[in-house]
Amino acid sequence: MTAVQMVPEAPGAPVTVAATGWRLAVRRFRRNTLAVIGLAVIVVVVLFCFVGPLLYPTDQTHTQLSQANLGPSAAHLLGTDAVGHDVLGRLMYGGTVSLTVGIAAGVLATVVGTLWGSVAGYVGGWVDAAMMRVVDAGIAIPALFILLVISAITTPGVAGLIVILGLVSWLVPSRLIRAETLTLKNRDYVLTLRAIGGSHARAIGKHLLPNSVSTIVVAATFQVADAILLVAYVSYLGLGVQAPATDWGGMLSAGLTAAYSGRWWLIVPPGLAVILVVCAFNAVGDGLRDAFDVRGR
Amino acid sequence: MSVLTTTDLGVAFRTESGTVDAVRGVSLRVEPGQTLALVGESGSGKSTVALAAMGLLSGNATASGSAVVDGTEVVGAAEPALRALRGSTVAMVFQEPATALDPLTRVGAQIAEVIRNHRQVSAAAAAAEAVDMLDRVGIPDPEQRARAFPFQLSGGQRQRVVIAMAIANSPKLLIADEPTTALDVTVQAEILELLRELAADTGTGVLLVTHNMGVVADFADRVAVMLQGEIVETGSVEDVLLRPEHEYTNRLLAAVPRLTVAAPAPAMSVASPPDGPGGRPDPAPVVDLRDVSVTFGRGARAVHALRGVDIAVHAGETVGLVGESGSGKSTAARVALGLIRPSAGSVHLFGTDLRRAQRRDRRSLRSGIGVVLQDPVASLDARMSVAECIAEPLAVHRRGMSGTDRRKRVDEVLDAVRLPRDLATRAPRELSGGQRQRVSLARALVLSPRLLVADEPTSALDVSVQETVLEVLRELQDDLGFACLFVSHDLAVVQQFAERVVVMRQGVVEEQGATGATLVHPTTDYTRRLLAAVPVPDPVVQRRRRAERLATLAAVTA
């Protein structure tokens, strides 16, 4: 064996020690001011809805007609509605429903979409073709229409809404994940693994999923924003959770008639809350997309 | 007067991690009718100089110093002035003809557009001139071809169209950035010939950016060698390539694999080697493709990637698989790896017919194979550490192995490929291209395979890095005695590295035999043409080879 003189490689190409992936991602995210604000808004709103009722307890089940339609005052910071519920308390109470349904439905949609898309992309061939035609067909039918029909038939509760919303909005994430899987499965490291006899399970579990995590997280963020908006639509049309339970969309709907008589406190707070939270989730999604450097949407 | 003069040209890029000086103090000049080659390895700043000369630097770059093109200062010039300059006084030919052309516009129209951008001529006149241009760059049947879309042309024809666009307004300076790197050697020889004729006819000065010393020897009059953003040596092509002064130029030239060329004497006197795989005594080959065909798609659109291919690799030997793009060499390697199932014929791995083997047996057979693929970036999963990458085959085939044993084995193979052990905890992203390919090699060797399949393992690397990787590979083969199927388009590398060679063309084995015989005294016209087209990094020898090649071609067409 001849001793090899080590030639320093690529003379002058120093091996730069790059920041690790996560640290780089955090740095990029923090540079996006809107995304940081969005994240702060989400944290504040979540605290407001879930911790707020402990600090500011109100009765949201019994009607108190003596207290109905009061304007904002020291006793009721945002006034009361037509059946005497404190609006600030109701905003918290409705928010728990909106956020729970929105986040759970968004996550459910992403999970279903990820499974569907990754199977289609990895298996390929006619399986892929058949699965994606299902997605195409689903996208061709307006989600809102399906949603309203099912809601009208079943009058769902919180769990029902989550399932229905999740099942109408997994289509877009499934396309995203399929595209990601298609490029990843032909990467040299996956080919190498398969050439030495590695299993499909290992290829998916060790390479495809970890490398799609960023795409999945970004997709999930946008899905949550969409789902919160969809819950508001459905409830606004009176097909969401039923009284005395409510959510922000339901509050808007109930307050709409009162708005003409000048009781702005019934519609402005829930309306702003929906806009604020949806914008915040979208901003965070944008920030995450930049941070992970993935294509999204 | 020089068509391009740069004085103390510098370029700095603002990046996420601070400002990087990519080019510093570059002074060079290109005279009319002369070709200056700017050579260097990746990251040396040679392409940045070319872009700066056209004022095409990206938004995060700032240029300093001066670059004067035919009397106009480019550094700091306003965009309208640069637009008037580009495409008329100075034109550019890029590396990848597939992306340099608009896929949705007919090529004639693309050339006409360049003409009408700079000259007041009627659409009809421009179209007629475009046809003339296609004729001039040697595209047969130019009237018909002008109406073709880029996808209907071959890679070489596309590059001719790009050149036609570049010379449409008779530029004084032509900048060619790796104009033949994406092309096969035979096509490369034709394109270089075309560029040479055009430059000689019109007195255009050429700035040629390349990493290929053979291309430099073939085409350039003067050479400037770049290292880390600075020019370290300038001179005539004979001086720089034959009598280099700077230590870096010396090292660079020493690392270039050189094609052994037959003496111009009659080749018939050489004793032909015995037929068969060098008369080896061992009975069963490690891997044996028998009459293998692979067809993608079906019906009229079917592509026959392999047609009746026989390739055998015996224990301990290295077989080079060469051919131009589309010859099926990578497909053959993938069939050997079991990634592609042949549509006809059989594959025997370690003496077992893969079609007859049980699923479980097939998997355990695979543990005897190591794989190194071309792309150093895509070969390693960015989310794993170097140790995890290397240990992956152990996780697949040695499930029971303890963590300590695994770490020990990883350290051993890291030693074997001559990488420091503390690299194990690093991320692949932190490694250079050559280090990554050595990590790939370590992963391939971790199970002590009997067969290594290497598909263009050094094609994406600079020559000096390629040399190191090949040295490590050769040394390991001597120690461990695995067989190797080595796929490459680079005949010089294969000539040095392989004992036997298989030449492929359009899915068929054109010729095979001992490397010393087949690649020096080929028996088929195709191999002869292939060899003749490889430029050697010696301007004197290359001039002779070029003349011979043209004479042969003329004799064939006559």
Image (cartoon, rainbow, N blue to C red):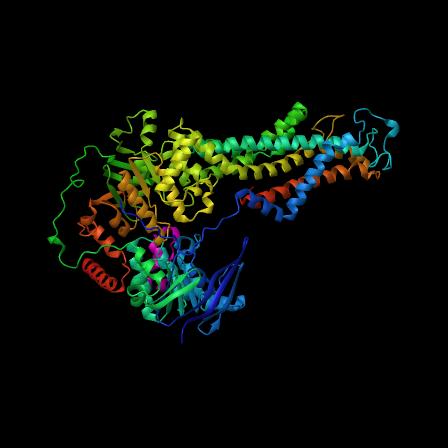
* Left or right of residue B281, residue A239 in this image: right
Q: Is residue B448 above or below residue B226?
A: above
Residue A48 spot, x, y in % from top left: 74, 35
Q: Residue at x 36, y 62 (%)?
A: B131
| Residue visible at 11% across and 53% down in the picture | B269
Residue at point 55%, 30% (across, down) = A112
* Residue B378 image position (x, y, % from top left): 42, 43
* Rendered position, B200 above or below B400: below
Above-or-below relation of B7 to B180: below
Say whether residue B150 is magenta: yes
Q: Is residue A202 visible?
A: yes
Q: Which residues, given as a range, are shown in magenta?
A: B130-157
Residue depicted at 53% across the width and 33% down the height: A114
Q: Evaluate whether residue B149 shows in this view.
A: no
Magenta highlight on residue A251: no
In this rendering, is residue A265 above or below A14?
A: above
Given residues B397 and A133, the one toward you in this image is B397
Left or right of A215 on screen, residue B440: left
Query: Which part of the image, by quadrant, shows the C terminus of chain A?
Result: top right
Q: Nearer the viewer, residue A195 or A112?
A: A195
Residue B206 relative to residue A159: left or right: left
The percent position of residue A179, horizontal first and vertical second, equals 48, 39
Dividing the picture into quadrants, the one containing residue A244 is top right
- Residue at the right extreme, as displayed: A66
**x, y percent for residue B286:** 25, 34
Q: Quadrant of residue B69?
A: bottom left
